[in-house]
Amino acid sequence: MANNKHSVSAFLQSLGKSLMLPVACLPVAGILIGIGYWLAAWDNIAVVANFLLQAGQAIINHIPLLFAIGIAVGMSDDQHGVSALSGLISWLVITALLSPENVASLRPGISLDAFAKSENVFIAIISGLIGAWSYNRFKNTDLPEALAFFSGKRSVAIVSAGISSLVALVLMFVWPLLYNALIALGKSITSTGAVGAGIYVFLNRLLIPFGLHHALNQVFWFDLAGINDLGHFWSGQGTLGQTGMYMSGFFPMMMFALPAAALAIYHSALPSQKKKIGALMLAGAISSFFTGVTEPLEFSFMFTAPLLYLLHALLSGLGAFVVALLPIRVGFNFSAGLVDFLLCLKSPMTLNPWGIWLIGLGMAVVYYLLFRLCIKVFRLKTPGRDTEEASHKSESPSHKAEETATASSLDSQADIILQALGGKANIRQLDHCTTRLRIELNDLQIVDQAGIKATKVNVIIVSGENSLQIVVGPKVEFLADIMKARLAQSL
């Protein structure tokens, strides 16, 4: 039973990581559309504005296709291009077979409402998973001499098309049921209005430790349940005052509240650790304010002070409820930072955007006061308040590693982390998402967590029986590439 739970957890974490690959493409669309809306105000450059708008909307309008390809690549063993092709083929086959015209010819008399929206993210996720599985399972297939041309990676596309045809046949009967259920879910949430927006943001924060918040986001941001908040916002085809409800509430929390929480943690740190914690909190606050990347801050206290993180989730949900209750609507493509805020100002769906700053400043005060109070009253072990670590740090074996990592590059950090993980022999799989290294190990017990923390990573998460996540920050991709290169050299 434990192994099954671990497998499901590992799969969901891997899927969450893969979802970030297509999501990372969306800021490009936001930049193009945002600049396009800004330039549209001047008639003499309307052609340029329209050019940029069309370029950005080309990405937004094909979000499901990006998901199919991105998930196929992200879930494959080695991110080979053949897996992307396999995911694309799966998407093309399923959407063609589920098109209203084809369904009408095969099932006369059936309602075609569900199939009019078959080109959605849900189908894209299925297509991506089929593409990745086909690649992982059949990339080394050895066929008889007569069929040798189709051996190996050439067989993947064929298998993907065959499996996709069977899946489309099943979906032809199952999809209307799923579609109606998803529409009911979307309507039930939208019918609760501001309350639903608050509940969503609260759950979004609670799911971050498990890496499952990406799955929840699909329901609200994309056309999985008929909401498509992100797509409608940037295409300008939504309802003014309604569209953006499930994105607006993130801005006060990410731009103002979390930086205030970082200040509270810094002020609560022991005098001997304030210099170190100040640098850590400042970096996290800047990341949160400008780009909306909050994990470096949230993971710094998520596990050392879970009560504080629960408070953060509750306050985030409350803030989102207040924003949704008021006529304030803004949107993002990547995350709710200053960059996306500025880009969305000229969107026709944007409504009273500067109200975000007023609510954000209010939330910042509430966050700071409550964080300081909770840390003091409950004696929470937030960063910089570990007295044992402070008194023994200079004597610990990891202190030397910390000095080395501080003065050196990512190469040294990679070497130290690999050594602390137990080396090549103990690492089964190494991957990463937006801010975290995701590692599958043979034996978790031999990992030197103190050595890893000495490289000034934000936090280490034991996510399974032999699974580890290390929150590094925005430079995680570069660190992961170096570590993979080191592992390849040791083969």
Image (cartoon, rainbow, N blue to C red):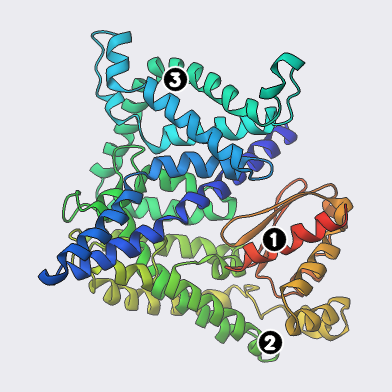
**Residue 319 % position (x, y):** 34, 64
Q: Earlier in the sequence, mark 2 or mark 1?
A: 2
Tell me which amino acid carries mark 2.
Answer: Gln
Q: Earlier in the sequence, mark 3 or mark 2?
A: 3
**Residue 93 % position (x, y):** 44, 25
Indicate the quadrant where residue 318 lies. bottom left
Indicate the quadrant where residue 187 lies. top left
Q: With 100 as the anchor, is 67 left or right in this view? A: right
Query: Separation of disc 3 and disc 2 at Cα?
Result: 59 Å
Q: Quadrant of the N terminus?
A: top right
183 versus 402 height, above or below:
above
Q: Nearer the viewer, residue 463 or 227?
A: 227
**Residue 365 % position (x, y):** 38, 80
Tell me which amino acid carries mark 3.
Answer: Ala
Pointer 1 local density, CA inside 10 Å: few below 14, some 14–19, many at least 20: some
Local SS, label 1: helix
Q: Residue at x 75, y 81 (%)?
A: 408
Q: With 176 as the anchor, is 273 left or right in this view? A: right
Q: Residue at x 39, y 60 (%)?
A: 28
Mark in front: 3 vs 2? 3
Residue corresponding to mark 2: 273
Tell me which amino acid carries mark 1.
Answer: Asp
Residue corresponding to mark 1: 481
Return the mark for residue 168.
3
